[in-house]
């Protein structure tokens, strides 16, 4: 972005055009053009220096060289229709239809002309969004001297123009979901959201939790956001930083300065947000949850975080199930249908088992794994092993809860001989101790 304010300052100090061009990295014709435009509009140098750089840039674009080879649209007429509610695309199509005798300008050129016209009418704030709207997008990539690549998740509230910048170490949907969740936790949930980037299931789940609706942004708001995006890139993304923490400091400094700038109405963006916008946000206490896939196990349970939750026996052959997990609840789904719901367990090797989920004796006969099979395998080892396995199955509240322990003990046959395993079981029975995989293995070692 050309720093016109600096060009004017250097010109006012009496520097030559060659010196100014070299210092500001611009062509001399740009300096000549700037002075000519100021002269055409009757703007003296002192007044021009006090103008915002964005205002001068819009003035330059609006007064730029006309593309005489192509007919230009009637911008004033287009603006009146636009102010009445017409969209830019509709106006551009109307303009194209009037160019039967010549080739129309491209849409990007039309957009720039309309952008300058809107700015000149100062219509931007008059047509701003209502309170309760948030727009989210990514900044450009930021490289740090220590080799990191970081990004800023940008949150803008169009009504007040307030912004929040949150650093993310990766440009992933997971990082953006966490940033959005943190923003809502701090300020509350708006009614509408516009996410100016691609997203999929994880973000959609978060939007559903907060009951947010996606919204269409008017052309005026989009113009504002493009200017803001450019300003963030100029002030942060294109600067050099020693490490990611320096990016945090720069983002905090810029957002604080930007939010406390005084607007034409005599109020700052932060003041408008605190007084007019934040009160309409919803203090929603949502139930945080995650989705996990789980494979049904032969003991009619699924495992999550070291604990086991029962499922109806008829679903044991399902290839995969979905778990919806909250802080205190685990819901189990198959093909979007709820098949079981449990209170969440928070200790390893705990079981949550419903008796109606367990197979009947008749059903067990046709299952691949059942108590009879474990006992037959234990009998192949010896009487003591059979006694240990039978005791485990009998002492469990539901025999399926002992299946994993039985399987672990019998799997020791792959590491030790049947004679050694039988001797370990004899030692356990002789000590009249509790039976567990860990205890049996101690005797083997």
Image (spheres, rainbow, N blue to C red):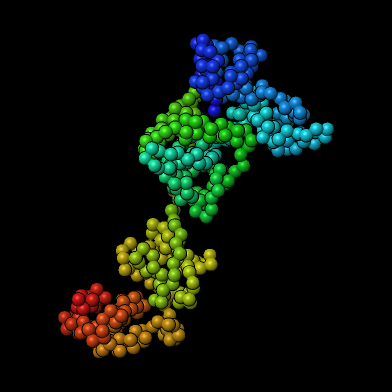
Give the quadrant of the N terminus: top right
Quadrant in the rendering for residue 326: bottom left
Residue at image location 47% in from the left, 46% down from the top: 171
Q: Nearer the viewer, residue 154 or 235?
A: 235
Farthest residue, direction right: 101
Q: Residue at x 67, y 28 (%)?
A: 113
Q: Can the viewer see residue 337 in this picture?
A: yes
Does the image show residue 398? Answer: no
Does 75 appear above or below 342? Answer: above
How many numbered markers are drawn?
Answer: 0
Q: Nearer the viewer, residue 193 or 90?
A: 90
Instruction: Place residue 289 in its image quadrant.
Output: bottom left
Q: Residue at x 41, y 61 (%)?
A: 329
Position of the C terminus, as image quadrant, is bottom left
Residue 4 location (% of width, % of height): 55, 21
User: Which residue is located at x 48 percent, y 25 percent?
Assistant: 261
In front: 290, or 64?
64
Residue 77 locus on image (x, y percent): 75, 27
Q: Is residue 416 above or below residue 111?
A: below
In this view, the residue in front, 3 or 373, is 3
383 relative to 86 in the view: left or right: left
Position of residue 191 measured from the top left corner of the image (x, y, whole percent): 54, 43
Is 260 placed left or right of 393 in the picture? right
Q: Is residue 240 depicted above or below 170 in this figure?
A: above
């Amino acid at each position: 972005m050309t720093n016109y304010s600096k060009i004017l300052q250097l010109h006012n100090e009496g520097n030559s055009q060659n010196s100014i061009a070299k210092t500001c990295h611009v062509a001399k014709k740009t300096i000549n053009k700037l002075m000519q435009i100021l002269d055409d509009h009757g703007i003296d140098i002192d007044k021009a220096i006090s103008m915002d750089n964005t205002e001068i840039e819009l003035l330059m674009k609006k007064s730029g060289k006309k593309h005489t080879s192509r007919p230009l649209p009637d911008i004033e007429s287009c603006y009146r229709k636009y102010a009445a509610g017409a969209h830019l695309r509709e106006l551009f199509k109307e303009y194209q239809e009037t160019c039967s005798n010549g080739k129309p300008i491209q849409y990007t050129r039309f957009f720039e002309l309309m952008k300058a016209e809107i700015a000149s009418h100062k219509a931007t704030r008059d047509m701003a969004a209502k309170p309760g709207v948030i727009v989210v997008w990514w900044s450009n990539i930021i490289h740090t001297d220590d080799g990191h690549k970081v990004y800023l998740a940008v949150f803008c509230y169009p009504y007040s123009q307030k912004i929040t910048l949150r650093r993310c170490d990766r440009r992933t949907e997971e990082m953006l979901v966490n940033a959005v969740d943190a923003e809502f936790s701090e300020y509350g949930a708006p009614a509408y959201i516009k996410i100016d980037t691609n997203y999929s299931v994880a973000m959609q789940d978060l939007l559903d939790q907060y009951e947010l609706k996606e919204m269409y942004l008017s052309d005026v708001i989009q113009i504002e956001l493009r200017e803001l995006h450019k300003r963030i890139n100029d002030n942060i993304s294109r600067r050099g930083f020693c490490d990611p923490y320096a990016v945090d400091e720069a983002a905090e400094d810029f957002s604080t300065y930007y939010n406390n700038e005084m607007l034409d109405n005599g109020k700052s963006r932060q003041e408008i947000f605190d007084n007019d916008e934040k009160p309409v946000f919803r203090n929603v206490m949502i139930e945080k949850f995650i989705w996990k896939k789980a494979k049904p196990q032969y003991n009619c349970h699924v495992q999550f975080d070291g604990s086991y939750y029962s499922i109806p026996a008829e679903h044991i052959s399902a290839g995969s199930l979905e778990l919806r997990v909250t802080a205190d609840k685990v819901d189990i789904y198959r093909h979007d249908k709820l098949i079981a719901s449990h209170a969440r367990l928070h200790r390893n090797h705990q079981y949550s088992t419903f008796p109606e989920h367990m197979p009947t004796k008749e059903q067990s006969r046709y299952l691949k794994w059942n108590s009879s099979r474990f006992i037959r395998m234990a009998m192949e080892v010896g009487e003591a092993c059979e006694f240990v396995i039978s005791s485990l199955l009998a002492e469990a509240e539901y025999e399926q809860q002992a299946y994993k322990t039985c399987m672990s003990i019998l799997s020791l046959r792959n590491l030790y001989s049947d004679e050694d395993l039988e001797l370990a079981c004899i030692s356990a029975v002789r000590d009249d101790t509790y039976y567990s995989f860990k205890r049996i293995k101690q005797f083997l070692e």
